[in-house]
Amino acid sequence: MHPEVIIHNSVSLDHAVRGFDVDLGQHYGALLALEPEAVLVGSATAKSGLEMFHDISEPEAEPDRHRRDVRPDDPRPIFVIVDSRGVLQNLLHFYRNMEHTKDVVVLVAEATPMDYLDYLREREYPFIRCGKSRVDLRGAIRELSERFGITRVVSDSGPELNDVLIREGIADTISLIVHPTIAGEGEKKLFDKAGGRVALELREAAPMEQGTVHLVYAVKR
Ligand SMILES: NC(=O)c1ccc[n+]([C@@H]2O[C@H](COP(=O)([O-])OP(=O)(O)OC[C@H]3O[C@@H](n4cnc5c(N)ncnc54)[C@H](OP(=O)(O)O)[C@@H]3O)[C@@H](O)[C@H]2O)c1
């Protein structure tokens, strides 16, 4: 079975994902309320998150090289990173150590550099290799469901990855926290490369604090 895939973004009124102050408490509160079993993140998002909040020159310690025990009753989601080019090489221990995630799984492709695959194997990061030059997202998410029993994935990514999820008909739901601001020209915008027309059905429209509005749409097929 294919898991449910939800895109979750905080956006300006002109659908930029940055260039304005995102309320992170609201963003992650609403994300967790979607009860993800896996949080899907693109490599650019994952790297920029680390650069924002960590000193990425900090090397891994010996315990960081080993996979933690995963209890079946642990309610925390797993963190799933799309990284066909090995952008996160030598940085994944930061995610392994994050308290709100129970495991880290990496999606790679046939073209992924061998030294990155060796890095993943040596450190016991489970990975799914699916797709030729880039990750075949539909196939990789299906395998994620089969291997890890995942039934709901929330994508906490930027426009590049989330647009592919729309373009390839993978996303089932779109959850947007719309901030009362126009980011203006120069910022990458969500859905600019989402392909042709996509019909949506409004499921929720709830005002939140700070003048934001939470909109949830089902993608109609
Ligand atoms: N406001 C928000 O809600 C929010 C949420 C998340 C992120 N952000 C911001 O968004 C920015 C990053 O966004 P971004 O769009 O540049 O990066 P991104 O979302 O991380 O997208 C890049 C990822 O998409 C994958 N990808 C792109 N096209 C693909 C395809 N055709 N098939 C398979 N995989 C494909 C890339 O794979 P490869 O591995 O092959 O390169 C890479 O892993 C950051 O500034 C971050 O802070 C904002």
Image (cartoon, rainbow, N blue to C red):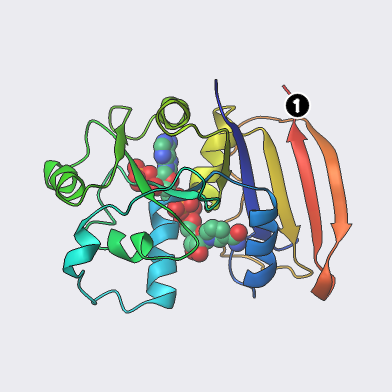
Q: Quadrant of the C terminus?
A: top right
- Position of residue 13 measured from the top left corner of the image (x, y, whole percent): 75, 61
Q: Nearer the viewer, residue 59 or 191?
A: 59
Does mark 1's beta carbon lie closer than 8 Å to ligand 1? no
Q: Position of residue 186 (x, y in %)?
A: 56, 65
Query: In this rendering, is residue 191 above or below 26?
Result: above
Residue 17 visible somewhere in the drawing: no
Q: Secondary structure at mark 1?
A: loop
Residue 136 in sight here:
yes
Q: Quadrant of the N terminus?
A: top right
Using the image, determine if residue 105 lies above or below residue 195: below
The reply, left or right, for residue 66 in relation to residue 3 is left
**Residue shown at 73%/59% (left/top)?**
177
Residue 129: x %, y % from top left: 29, 32
> Who's the residue at 13% across and 45% down the image?
118
Quadrant of residue 208 within the rendered picture:
bottom right
Q: Residue 119 or 51: which is nearer the viewer? A: 119
Q: Is residue 167 above or below residue 114?
A: above
Q: Residues within 10 Å of mark 1 (few under 14, many from 20)?
A: few
Judge by depth and name the residue closer to the eye, 119 or 171.
119
Please tell me how many numbered marks the rendered image carries. 1
For residue 197, side relative to residue 63 (left or right): right
Give the residue at x 57% y 30%: 3
- The three-letter code of the residue at mark 1 reads Lys
| Residue, disc 1 | 220
* Residue at 21% in and 47% down: 120
Give the quarter of the image for residue 187. bottom right
Q: Position of residue 104 (x, y in %)?
A: 37, 50
